[in-house]
Amino acid sequence: MKRSSDKYIITKNMEWEDLGGGVSRKMLGYDNQIMMVLVNFKKDAVGTPHSHFHTQATYCVEGKFEFEIDGVKQVVSAGDGVYIEPNLVHSAVCLEAGKLIDTFSPVREDFLDGSGVSYFGNKED
């Protein structure tokens, strides 16, 4: 398995990876310590409640989302950020079609090897 991304990730040359449920993504860069992912949500798409041991920081590029982290809800829109501590249950509902940039530390091995898609709990959903 490749342990780091290319130095330059030109997104116009990349296909979206369809995750189902109105969600798709493009990997923007990673190594063993960090991973950045562009995630596209159609209106009403849901990132179901889940948790992981990774620290996550998310930037809302466009659209509007209702996040819930550890039982606390907050609507975020373009220009807003979200910080999620490791192991906290979190979810998001897309209120207006948009894009998020998710950053994880350490790298999400499950994203690289295809063993799971945390947005939905598992890849079969």
Image (spheres, rainbow, N blue to C red):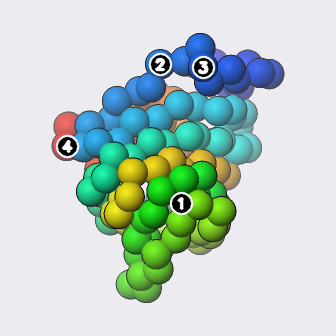
Number of marks in picture: 4
Q: Position of residue 2 (x, y in %)?
A: 63, 18
Characterize the local packing of mark 2: few (<14), some (14-19) or many (20 or more) Cα atoms within 10 angstroms. few
Q: Position of residue 27 (x, y in %)?
A: 58, 31
What amino acid is at disc 4?
Asp
| Dot 4 and dot 3 residues touching (CB under 8 Å) | no
What amino acid is at disc 1?
Phe
Q: Earlier in the sequence, mark 4 or mark 3?
A: 3
Characterize the local packing of mark 3: few (<14), some (14-19) or many (20 or more) Cα atoms within 10 angstroms. few
Q: How far apart are labels 1 and 4 at the CA level? A: 21 Å
- Left-right relation of 58 to 30: left
Q: Which residue is mark 4?
A: 125
- Identified at 46% across, 75% down, the residue is 75
Q: How far apart are labels 4 and 3 at the CA level? A: 28 Å
Give the structural element (helix, strand or loop) at label 3. helix
Q: Which mark is residue 12?
A: 3
Characterize the local packing of mark 4: few (<14), some (14-19) or many (20 or more) Cα atoms within 10 angstroms. few
Foreground pick, 78 / 54:
78
Q: How far apart are labels 2 and 1 at the CA level? A: 28 Å
Residue 68 visible? The answer is: yes
> Toward which corner of the image does residue 7 lie, by quadrant?
top right
Q: How far apart are labels 2 and 4 at the CA level? A: 21 Å
Q: Of the residues tagged 1 and 4, which is closer to the observer? A: 4
Q: Of the residues tagged 4 and 3, which is closer to the observer? A: 3
Q: Earlier in the sequence, mark 2 or mark 1?
A: 2
Q: Which mark is residue 19?
A: none
- Identified at 48% across, 56% down, the residue is 63
Q: Residue furthest bottom?
A: 72
